[in-house]
Amino acid sequence: MMDCSTDREILEKLHTYIPGDSCEQVCLQLFGMPGHGKSSLINTCVCVVQDGVLRNVAGAGKSNEPITVERKDFHLTDKIVITDNRGVSKMSKEELVEMNAQFCHLRGRDRVEWERSFRENLNAVVAFVYQNKEVIVPIFVYSAESLVTEERYRELEPFIRDAHRITGIYPIIVLTKVQDHGTESAIHHRKFKDLGAEHIFQIENYTIETCERNPETKSRILVLLDTCLQEADRQISENQMKDLHREYLKNAMRVIESKMMVDFENKVTQFEKGEAAYQRMKAEHDQKIEEIEELRKQNQARERELLKLKEHRKSCSIM
């Protein structure tokens, strides 16, 4: 049975929350694959915190096609923002660089491009003057109905590691669509724990199609948000002991170095593909030359035979 008094206490805490140390707001930064429930989670959080009618404020869709292509902020309160992000189809190196750039405060609230040039990243560092105005709490949304594969967990490992290294917070995992996938959800829970995740929540989001509100979902959403604030407060406290300007520059340069390495690897791959294509074309060309040479030899043999035949006919006519 849910503790209604606890729910009321968390709601009051959310609405009166003010981050310390001159930090202006807490940003709950959502990441995840398309169709895994990021937008539905935002709709549910807004509905619970604002205690209103469920509305599709985040534009949740029914398909697995990426709908969100830019970072969008949704204010839960004056000091708590939940941010939707472009879905990641695969944790590619380009996507990891872009997500790390967001963790480093190198990105504004604009269109999310997985492939940015080295100059764009460098300009962001030069133009940006770090100010401790926002603490980021990374949240990774993952559908329990998704296939359980070791390859997928290997893709997620660098994201979880880098998010913790940059923000100081292990991504909070939200497993969605758990109602009909209890076995898969348990496996995902164990795997994410193995990857280092400290907080994992199983939440059945409200949806526009089935928008019945229930106390269990409400309580789990409130505990999730309360956990986010606890992590944010801990990080704000730890930041007081750090040189944040230095940390910012160090993390930003890592992002730029990573981008340079990705660009270099892509060029090497393109060169290797070009070299492989050239070798294939050369092999095909050499084969054609051999075929032409063979035809030329056959043609010469026929010409010799024809010459012999003509000489034979000529000798026969003289006799």
Image (cartoon, helix red, strand yellow):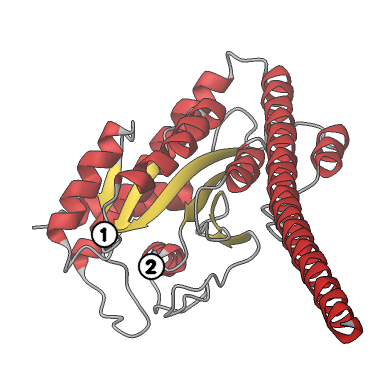
Q: Position of residue 177 (x, y in %)?
A: 27, 66
Residue type marked 1: Ala
The mark closer to the camera, 2 or 1, is: 1
Q: Secondary structure at mark 1?
A: loop
State how many labels appear.
2
Farthest left residue?
1
Q: Position of residue 257 (x, y in %)?
A: 72, 28
Tell me the number on the disc at residue 44.
Answer: 2
Q: Quadrant of residue 41?
A: bottom left
Identified at 86% across, 72% down, the residue is 307
Q: Position of residue 281 (x, y in %)?
A: 74, 56
Give the Cα separation between the discs numbered 2 and 1.
Answer: 18 Å
* Residue 106 appearing in the image: no
Comes first in the chain, label 2 or label 1: 2
Residue type marked 2: Thr
User: Label 1 belongs to which residue?
Assistant: 144
Q: Quadrant of the N terminus?
A: bottom left
